[in-house]
Amino acid sequence: VTQEPRLKICQVALDTPVRRLFDYLSPSGPGPQVAAQPGMRVRVPFGRQQLVGVVVHLRDHSEIAPDKLRPILTVLDEQPLFSEADLSLLLWAANYYHHPIGQVFAAALPRLLREGDDGLRPTTVWCLTAAGHAALNDAALNRAPKQRLLLQTLAQNTETPSAALNESLTEWRNAARALVEKCWIESHQRNSNADAANAAMTLRETEPVPSSAQAAAIQRLLAAPHGGFLLDGVTGSGKTEVYLRVIAAVLARGDSVLVLCPEIGLTPQLLHRFEQRFNAPIAALHSGLTDSERARAWVTAARGQARIVIGTRSAVFTPLPRLGLIVIDEEHDSSYKQQEGGFRYSARDLALLRGAQEKVPVVLGSATPSLESLQNVAMQRLTHISLPERAGTAQPPRLVLVDMRAHAVHKGIAMPLLQAMQRHLEAGAQVLLYLNRRGYAPSLVCQGCNWSAPCRSCDARLTVHQRADRLACHHCGAEEPRPTRCPRCGYEVHALGHGTERVEETLAERFPQYAIERFDRDTLRQQQELEAAIDRVNSGAARILIGTQMLTKGHHFPDVSLVGILNADQSLFSTDFRAAERLAQTIVQVAGRAGRAERAGEVMIQSQYPEHPLLTQLLQEGYAGFAASCLTERAAAHWPPFSRLAVLRASAATAAAVMRFLQAAAALPNSDTHVVMRHPMPSTMHRRADRYHAQMVVESLDRMRLQKFLDLWVPQVEALPGTQGLRWALDVDPLEVF
DNA sequence: AGCACGCCGACT
DNA sequence: GTCGGCGTGCTC
């Protein structure tokens, strides 16, 4: 690597909240040093600490006084991890989301790399030997419970990394040593997962014959050198097959592909489908990985050894030499927007920008496109490609509303739905019920004085969890024992309302002959458990499925012929401007789980307000018609995507402190009459986890004007005095305003 | 964010 | 007399 000799100053992004790059002198120490180049990680002195940062620019001079400049200690990479294009995406993101640059880089790097590791350390994996499999029930283990547990844990997978054992077991290493001596288990070192880097990119499985609509979509995408596309196709229309065909073409010309999935959409099943189809090295970046697996997959991608990168939100920053295509599956999914912490970016929006900068096509796929994307189609910023038909002979599901006022309701389920369940179950099919409320009941109420169990730390009721026999707060995680009598008046307390746990109980009483599978965070804590539950459904062992959001994404259950949506009303009267869009997307997505086989699916939506225009319109006109009129309303009300929002969110130990801060922020000067600062408001749930939350909205019809305002405003907000104990974050393009 | 420096209350 | 509370300020 050569370096212009006069470019002595390295501008480095460091993980601090300081919104600035830090200037360092090129490394001066003795010994062979690689010259620092943009995109390389460096270790630098920072005050009394040492930090790892990324070189962003080389300069020939610095604004910083020469006596303050210190040299880089070590250059950690021989080749840049980030290309100029990668760096410019990160700089753009820091600028647009008004977030400190170093923390943007930190979000883009896996933890080990962020801390200076090279990400290529081999990991130790453990597996059973043949003798170990035979010994699973050996009597010798009766007096060695830790060894038995380890053996059973390892039996669940072909290979288990040490890090995974650290998480699920404690002090397993002694047991492992004993088992190794018995020759029942063994360990191996695993290196890069891109061993097949030079394999031919031939297709493995035989390709299905595309439908005419699929063929047309594939044609249009292949003909496009770059640009954004909205692949708008109902569930079952075969969007994945379109992705796979286009990906195959990109791989064939030697380019690589970035595929983004929603958080719960990235399953081993999907990965498996890619592995079956392509004989190409794949790097998967999902939440189930250990730190070292993640670092290794990331480095594999950055070094150009992976041809396909599949990942969730943060994978949008993965460097990929020769990027040829970006695919964003289920583009409407809210998990693409980071909604916690400081750096709140939209991976979908950044992917579109990345595609434009690198001049590669970006395909957004959804059966229920976001209004943003539909508006982008209207503005001709995205090209619309629709896949109207369901593949094969499948019929679209039939949607009906069930009026809960007109029918007897048995523990949260109306009679027509119970009868339909009976019918479908007797016909041998599976039934899926959706209820976006986990736990047994959303509150514990006193029959005498109307007291209901409150969370000590939040403005919320505690949820009853029957099996654990505890009360839990779903907002802060607090738990307490479940009282049998009212602490205020001593009268009896009762669980009020219905969560998935209670519906499961009700169904077990009502349909004792059919096995039930519950899908929520309480029953399926780990990815493995989810996989096992899906297997039980697909094998036909389970007949009734009841679950939350977890059930609505990514998994297809071909034998489900009836879907029940138990409570569609929660969002009908929400004040959030996106509530209607989200409800429609949920209904259509859940409905899409039914009727994939030859028989038409049936979808029953329970409501107290079946005449609500939101519901009737969705049923009569479908998602497209619904979305069109939703857009009209947004335009009239000047909501996004017709205006641009930013929300300043803050929390503090007292309500007064958080409001004082936001009022000070609201009082800062604003010379642009096209930018409106709304009044600071306490959040819908003001007190959460013993902190008081509030926010203020800033809006403009003009994105550029809002950006220019934020450029001036955010540094002043940052400089406001008296912010000890106060946490704040700016949310540009928020999903929610409250 | 860390990690210092810097001034005011209760302890050996 | 100091140990330590966390308020303010800086890090190239």
Image (tube, coloured by chain):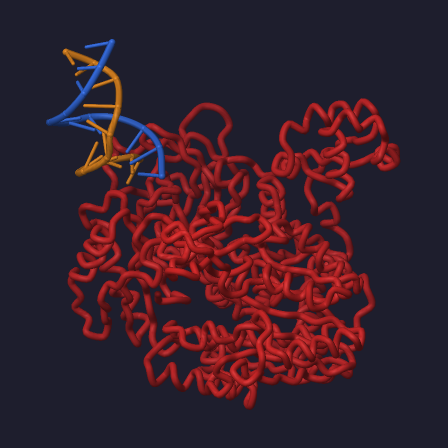
Chain colours: A red, B blue, C orange
Seen as rendered, the residue at the extreme bottom is A620
Q: In the depicted view, which residue is nearer to us: A99 or A270?
A: A270
Residue A695 falls in image quadrant: bottom left
The residue located at (55%, 55%) in the rendering is: A315
Left or right of A624? Residue B5 is left
Q: Is residue A39 above or below residue A182?
A: below
Residue A565 falls in image quadrant: bottom right
Left or right of C5? Residue A207 is right
Where is residue A723 drawn, in percent x and y? 23, 46
Where is residue A239 drawn, in percent x and y? 66, 74
Q: Is residue B10 above or below residue A725?
A: above
Residue A324 visible here: no
Residue A44 falls in image quadrant: top left
Residue A221 visible here: yes
The residue located at (44%, 59%) in the rendering is: A445
Left or right of A151? Residue A164 is left
Where is residue A290 drawn, in percent x and y? 60, 42
Where is residue A608 drawn, in percent x and y? 49, 80
Q: Is residue A550 above or below residue A70?
A: below
